[in-house]
Each structure stands twice: as structure tokens, then as C-alpha cells.
Amino acid sequence: MAREKVNLETSQIAWKELQRFFAAGAAVFIASDLDLVDVAYQFSIDNKDQVALWMQSNQVALVSDQQAVDWFEADVEVWAVVVKPWILVQE
């Protein structure tokens, strides 16, 4: 998946629309200091080393129960992109 393709597939969506992905354990939080397109690209090329570094620094993690509740109650819109089997989300 090329960066340009990732960029075209990125969109804003209401968090409430992504509940089934969260319930399936497939919603991945991306910290706001990271570029969502770059992270999605690294996922798509299976760059495990880079993803592991982001996870160690808590910049990439599964969406927590508390985040999900807070976003749901606040009716937050997130930026999202699908990199199967994951959906990457960023506030």
C-alpha cells in the first residue's frame, strides 16, 4: 500500500460508527504527535520494528476501554484509516 493510497483512504468519522471494530479488538489508537498516514503505511508494509518502538513509547496502542467511553460520550470524530485487520484512529 503506497503512502498516496493510504492518504486517500484516510477520513474523519464519528467514533460511534467504529464501535464494532473496538469490540473486536481491532481499533488502534495513534498519538496525535504521529503522522497517521505514516503510521498506517508502516503497518501496511509490516514494519514490526517501528511499530514496536511506537508501542513501547505508548504512541500506538489498542484503544482503551476508557478512551472508547470518553470518545463515545463526547461524540468525538476521529481520523481513521483501515489497514486490515486494524482500523487506526487518531483524535
Image (cartoon, rainbow, N blue to C red):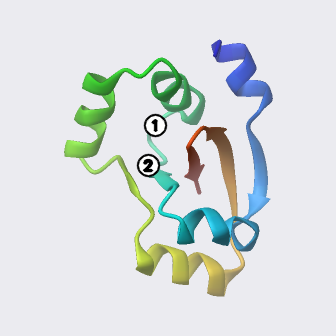
- The residue that mark 1 highlights is 34
Count of marks placed on residues: 2
Q: To which quarter of the image does residue 83 belong?
A: top right
- The residue that mark 2 highlights is 31
- 64 vs 21, left or right, is left
Mark carried by residue 85:
none
**91 to 7, vertically: above or below:** below
The three-letter code of the residue at mark 1 reads: Leu
Q: Residues within 10 Å of mark 1 (few under 14, many from 20)?
A: few
Q: To which quarter of the image does residue 48 belong?
A: top left
Residue 16 in the image: x percent, y percent? 72, 74
- Identify the element where label 2 is drawn: loop
Residue 30 in the image: x percent, y percent? 47, 47
Q: Please give the name of the residue rendered at 49% of the width and 47% of the height, measured from the top-left corner.
A: 32
**53 to 45, vertically: above or below:** below
- Identify the image quadrant of the C terminus: bottom right
Q: Are marks 2 and 1 in contact (CB under 8 Å)?
A: yes
Q: Residues within 10 Å of mark 2 (few under 14, many from 20)?
A: some
